Image (cartoon, helix red, strand yellow):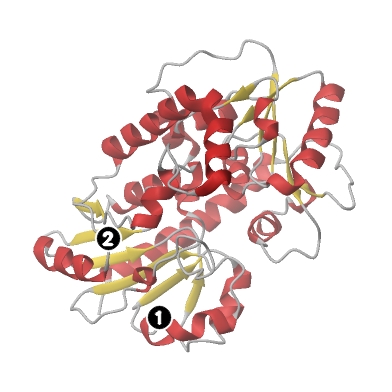
Amino acid sequence: MSKKIGILTYHSAINYGAALQCYALRQALNQYSSDVSVLNLVTKLQEDNNSILKKGKGVKSIIIQIALLPFLGKRIKKNKRFEEFQNLYFNCTDRIENQDEFQELLKRIEIDTVIVGSDQVWCPSIEDFTDNFFIPFDMPITKIGYGVSIGKTEKEGLLPYKKYIELFSYIGVREKSAISVLQQVVNKELIEVVDPTLLLTRQKWLSIVEKIESKKISKPYMICYFLKKEQFNVSYQLAKKIAREKGLEIYFINQRYSRHSFNKNTIYDAGPQEFLELIKNSDFVCTDSFHGTIFSLIFQKEFYTFIESKQGKDTRRQDLLKNLDAFERCIYLDDIHLSEGVINYKQINKKLNAMRDKSNQFLKYALLNED
């Protein structure tokens, strides 16, 4: 009888990386089970973060709501696209909000295996973190970590969860830098694996892009996807300069609302599939996002990934591009040196295929050799 697998991750966020990594992990797991569901853990805080109407109080909250009014229609459309994507591809369970409901759900639907990851599921410092990502209770299920990320967390932040991490049968970690931190906390074998989005081939990603109908940008264009508000102006000015030199129209995928959201050619309503399509059809990509970088690689785009400084602790993109011998695509905004020439995707794809094979082997071994 096929085992029942549950995925536990940040699946409900109105965030392209969160939605697409969850989709990819479920697709990868479908070859091992005909019953793979996403455990629909959504805390009240996570729900509030996704809400069109923020729940804050006071004058500041009122001002924010007024400032966001011009984008209301597009925000509603975007959220609807995320919801439709989740309904179509995630196979979510009933919603749960806390540990008691989590345990009751696992018993009721008779889950055999829970896979935690990807995303920063083991990063206690992020706003909507919940310790449920460590599965902090004893049940007769197999616990596997796949592509877990700790963000900027150091040893001290993980020590309170040491006993729960040790109950995981297998742990695949997304960043090499996270392995060195986790090794100070637990005495377990830790395997470096790729983000779930890289488990799927370019052709598999193209197959879901082709299922949507949208208005295409007719001119050659650069797509920009910037998440970091504090460095947006520097990123914007540099991207404009590059686009001008390359003779490209510049477009922005809006994720964080700010005064820059009023820039010309800003796209507010892209869902996960539209996000993929915008990158796929672009002529160049500038981003400061991990998944923006990944999908530039998947769709074999010329790109730069902007990093604030060499002293930053979030090394996800650097680790990935070093593994692919494409580190020159990292541009440090405090010391800008633009690389010349085109990206050697023949070499990158060879390395990427090897990394994908290794990660698929980890999943296969973890699922077929359960304790």
| Residue underneath mark 1 | 165
Residue at 34% of width from left, 35% of height from top?
A: 85
- Visible residue check, residue 277: no
Number of marks in the rendered image = 2
Can you tell which quarter of the image residue 6 is in? bottom left
Residue at 70% of width from left, 32% of height from top?
A: 260
Can you tell which quarter of the image residue 324 is in? bottom right
Location of residue 370 in the rendering, given as x and y in whole percent from the top left corner: 26, 75
Q: Residues within 10 Å of mark 2 (few under 14, many from 20)?
A: some
Kind of residue at disc 1: Ile
Location of residue 113 in the rendering, given as x and y in whole percent from the top left corner: 24, 67
Kind of residue at disc 2: Glu
| Residue underneath mark 2 | 97
Q: Nearer the viewer, mark 2 or mark 1?
A: 2
Mark 1: secondary structure: helix
Position of the N terminus, as image quadrant, is bottom left
Dot 2 or dot 1: first in sequence order is 2
Which residue, as the protein is rendered here, is positioned at the far front? 59
In the rendered view, tell whether residue 269 sits above or below residue 227.
above
Tag 2–tag 1 contact (CB < 8 Å): no
- Visible residue check, residue 191: yes
Which residue, as the protein is rendered here, is positioned at the far top? 218
Q: Residues within 10 Å of mark 1 (few under 14, many from 20)?
A: many
- Between 358 and 209, the one lying in front of the other is 209
Mark 2: secondary structure: loop
In the rendered view, tell whether residue 332 sits above or below residue 85.
below
Residue at 47% of width from left, 56% of height from top?
A: 357
Location of residue 254 in the rendering, given as x and y in whole percent from the top left corner: 59, 33
- Between 132 and 366, the one lying in front of the other is 132
* Residue 157 numbered mark, or none: none
In the rendered view, tell whether residue 205 sits above or below residue 105.
above
